[in-house]
Amino acid sequence: MEGKVTPALIKELRDRTAAGMLDCKKALEACECDMDKAIDWLREKGITKAAKKADRVAAEGLCSYAVNGNDVVLYELNSETDFVAQNDKFLALLDKVGTILANSSVSNTEDALKLDVNGKDLATVILEDSSVIGEKISLRNVQRLTKADNQVFGAYKHNGGNIVVVDIVEGSDVVAKDVAMHVAAMAPKYVSREEIPADVIEHEKSVILAEALNENAKAAKPKPEQIVAKMVEGRLNKELKEVCLLDQAFVKNQDQTVGEYAKANGTTVCKFVRLKVGEGIEKVVVDFAAEVAAQAGLNK
């Protein structure tokens, strides 16, 4: 995306990377205001580490899940303010939506909103409840997990639904619950390295290589090419460990990985889904002082 470098863009990049304002400005200029490319640019220059897109999340609401036999549906219901997400009418709607989804076969938000509910689609039902609640309410992140008869679900809901995790394991239901709690806390992206798409690994490797080469070029005594290659491999392995569930240090026992904990208890972790309220949503930040000043004509 091309555009003009603005203070707002600089602030967003700084918030997401902790880099200096001047470095953020240079990165945005070099990358034509493409935020993701600017983050990579800063990483390649050794100015910052990877930034999480979730850092810019600020939407309200709750996540939840509903189980029906071997199926579980996870979903997110967003509201405009956090206090509305705690009122009885919103919570009743959250439960109603869960029951409707669990008794259907939908596995995505688009199909969920088209579900027939006593002659109305679910989108209309939510809209009608929104008018009663007094805020815009929206459904998103509908996902379905299906387990085999010999598998069990593990579920964990943090802070009433700010984060919800459901996993599928073969083995202990205690391990399933522990793994769900771990996923909520540590936010892995994949169960194991085998799940990581090749293009994701190649992208990460290219960024790390550029960073290493830049460091080497600035070093008083540059390292041989083969040493740099080993450095890149080591850093890549470290990055991959941080996003893979089975490679992460278990939150309840830092001396073993999640994979080791599961294996020691005769359990295999198969899948997981983690939802966090508002993840990926940009929330408009209102400058109330500026708004008041504008309405009062102070900015003329």
Image: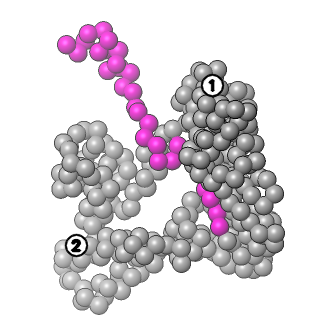
Residue 226 tag number: none
Mark 2 lies on residue: 214
> The residue tagged with tag 2: helix, strand or loop?
helix
Measured as percent of width and height from the top left, residue 132 is found at: 64, 20
> What amino acid is labelled 2 in the image?
Asn
31 on left or right of 56: left
Q: Residues within 10 Å of mark 2 (few under 14, many from 20)?
A: some
**Which stretch is magenta?**
271-300
The C terminus: image quadrant: top left
Residue 128 tag number: 1
Q: Earlier in the sequence, mark 2 or mark 1?
A: 1
Q: For marks 2 and 1, give the one nearer the viewer.
A: 1
Measured as percent of width and height from the top left, residue 29 is found at: 18, 51
Which residue is located at x 24 percent, y 89 percent? 224
- Is 23 colored magenta in this rendering? no
Residue 231 shows up from this direction: yes
Identify whether 210 is placed above or below 184.
below
Query: Which quadrant holds residue 70?
Result: bottom right
Query: Which quadrant holds residue 89?
Result: top right
> The residue tagged with tag 1: helix, strand or loop?
helix
Query: Which quadrant holds residue 128?
Result: top right
Identify whether 74 is placed above or below 50.
above
